[in-house]
């Protein structure tokens, strides 16, 4: 297994019955490595603040992950600055403690992350939160003009072709 770029392990035996606040920040080297991993032009800031406590069903971490990233427009490659602020609610469960049966989750269930060993990695949890918050197809202000110039039409501008052109009218008459 490859080591995470932004690893902040927290030992499980340090969590008591009460909550503990854990604040983490990625340094420049970690941010550059994560930017490469996530296909970003840059990752200028990544911080997280978690309230962590032990429960019978695992380690629970609630908090906020914040990041400043620059993505490339999926059409023009122009840089698009993006601010991310995500509330997170995670339950860390030991991988060995889960059997092979499916687990039914309720609507208010926490996102589940698995861990092995004696620590949970809050840094990797923060990094994955940022990855999930990214727009997979970001479009900048020049994207529409570039698509039109390339001859790409919007979905609402598409006209039926040939033999299918009259089908829509026939279906509407019924």
Image: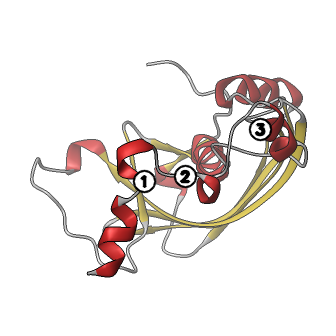
Near mark 2 (Cα within 10 A), the count class, few <14, some 14-19 or many ≥20, is few
Question: 42 or 27, which lies in front?
Answer: 42
Looking at the image, do the residues carrying marks 3 and 2 touch, with CB atoms under 8 Å apart? no
Residue to which mark 2 is pinned? 159
Q: Measuring from the top left, give residue 96's x and y in whole percent.
A: 22, 42
Quarter location, residue 136: top right
Work out whether residue 171 can be spotted.
Answer: yes
Q: Which of label 3 and label 2 is nearer to you?
A: 2
Q: Mark 3 or mark 1: which is in front?
A: 1
Residue 113 position in % (x across, y down): 42, 51
Give the Cα separation between the discs numbered 3 and 2.
17 Å
> As drawn, is 74 to the left or to the right of 111?
right
Please tell me whether mark 3 sits on a helix, a strand or a loop.
Answer: helix
SS label for mark 2: loop
Q: Which residue is mark 1?
A: 165
Q: Which residue is mark 3?
A: 147
Q: Nearer the viewer, mark 1 or mark 2?
A: 1
Pinpoint residue 1: horizontal percent, then vertical percent.
Answer: 43, 19
The answer to whether mark 1 and mark 2 are in CB contact below 8 A is yes
Mark toward the start of the polypeptide (1 vs 2): 2
Asked if residue 124 is positioned above or below residue 52 in the image, the reply reads: above
Tell me what residue is drawn at x 66 percent, y 51 percent: 154
Residue at position x 73%, y 35% from top? Answer: 74
Task: Relative to 57, say whether 44 is above or below.
Answer: above
């Amino acid at each position: 297994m490859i080591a995470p770029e932004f690893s902040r392990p927290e030992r499980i035996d340090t969590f008591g019955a009460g909550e503990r606040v854990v604040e983490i920040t990625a340094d420049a080297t970690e941010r550059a490595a994560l930017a490469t991993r996530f296909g970003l032009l840059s990752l200028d800031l990544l911080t997280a603040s978690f309230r962590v406590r032990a429960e019978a069903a695992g380690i629970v971490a609630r908090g906020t992950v914040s990041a400043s990233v620059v993505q490339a427009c999926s059409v023009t490659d122009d840089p698009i600055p993006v601010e991310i602020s995500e509330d997170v609610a995670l339950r860390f469960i030991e991988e060995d403690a889960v059997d092979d049966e499916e687990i039914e989750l309720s609507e208010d269930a926490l996102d589940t992350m698995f861990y092995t060993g004696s620590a949970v990695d809050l840094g990797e949890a923060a990094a994955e939160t940022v990855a999930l918050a990214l727009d997979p197809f970001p479009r900048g202000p020049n994207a529409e003009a570039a698509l039109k110039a390339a001859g790409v039409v919007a979905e609402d501008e598409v006209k039926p072709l040939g033999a299918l052109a009259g089908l829509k009218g026939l279906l509407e008459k019924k």
